[in-house]
Image (cartoon, rainbow, N blue to C red):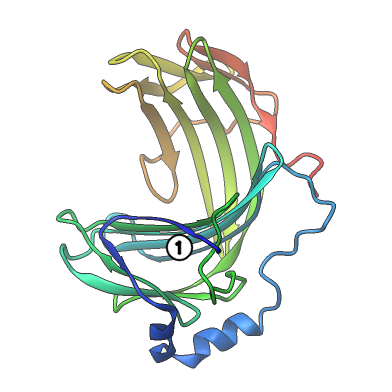
Amino acid sequence: MRSFSSIVVSVALLTPGCARDESEHAVQAAESAGTSAPIAANDEREGTIFHLEGRHGTPAELWVEASYKIRRDAGKLSKTLAIDVEHAAPGVAHALSIDGFALAKLVTSSKGKAEYELTEAGDDYFPEGFREPREGSVVKVGDLAEIRLQTVHKLTDLQTDIAGPGPLSGKVGYKIERLGDQETTEFQVKVTHAEAKSVHPVLIDGTHVGDLTVDLAGKGKLLYSTLEGEPFPPDFRAPHAGSTIEVGQIYRGPLRDHLAGTE
């Protein structure tokens, strides 16, 4: 018997049969777009190998974001559909569907947030009748938003992993992506299991660009983005492949070009 994994906040699942009330144009858009992911049989890349996304609103106000990713980690594929809602009216239920297939009733929290995640990996499968998203697939969140998924094109993807000592782990990344006619840039440093209530200066090629603050749980994140999070400092100089990243005393190493050799 097939099973599926769904991690949701304030969500009531619906049966597939309820989806028939959705507009037919969403299904037709998906069917005319062809296959969900142009992944060659011999494609053995690690990390995200296919990425669709759609957005609605502005991050400071009503914001709805939908994404579908196919990843390979340690040789194993996973497929994840995720929907996030922020700054919506609290305590309101919204019917969530994709290409006319009913997924759930998404209920916003007291802070106006809601999230939904559906994953196919290992022994977990998408529900019977569910069709994988593709270019042009339509995600509908009640009356809040109707989002058409588009391919995310990575223009720059620089990364390095933080590992140890002990359970300390994390990642540093700088990426530039294009979705439709919008281009976004992001720099992020993220750690877990670091020293609680500690502060670590972050340097790129010897230049201080910010501070990573770790909370009581040992988690910390520094995020600059042209889309959400803190804006980039005026004097921020973009890193390049080989740029040296320093995070206090816990990490020092070069950024690697994650796109090299993947085209």
Residue drawn 66% across and 69% down? 36
What residue type is disc 1 on? Answer: Ala
Q: Quickly name the residue at label 1.
A: 66
Identify the residue at horizontal 53%, vertical 69% (top origin).
149
Residue sitting at 62 percent across and 16 percent down? Answer: 253
Task: Say whether residue 112 is left or right of residue 223.
Answer: left
Return the residue found at the far front. 1
- Position of residue 150 in the picture relative to residue 86 (left or right): right
Observer-nearest of 12 and 143: 12
Give above or below for 143 relative to 126: below
Quarter-of-image position of residue 110:
bottom left
Q: Position of residue 92 (x, y in %)?
A: 18, 69
Determine if residue 98 is in view: yes
Crowdedness of circle 1 by 10 Å Cα count: few (<14), some, many (20+)?
many
Q: Nearer the viewer, residue 69 or 73?
A: 73
Q: Quadrant of residue 34?
A: bottom right
* Residue 226 placement (x, y as % from top left): 44, 47
Count of numbered marks: 1
Nearer to me, 98 or 174: 98
* Spot occupied by residue 238 in the image (x, y as percentages of width and height): 57, 33
Residue 134: x, y in percent?
61, 71
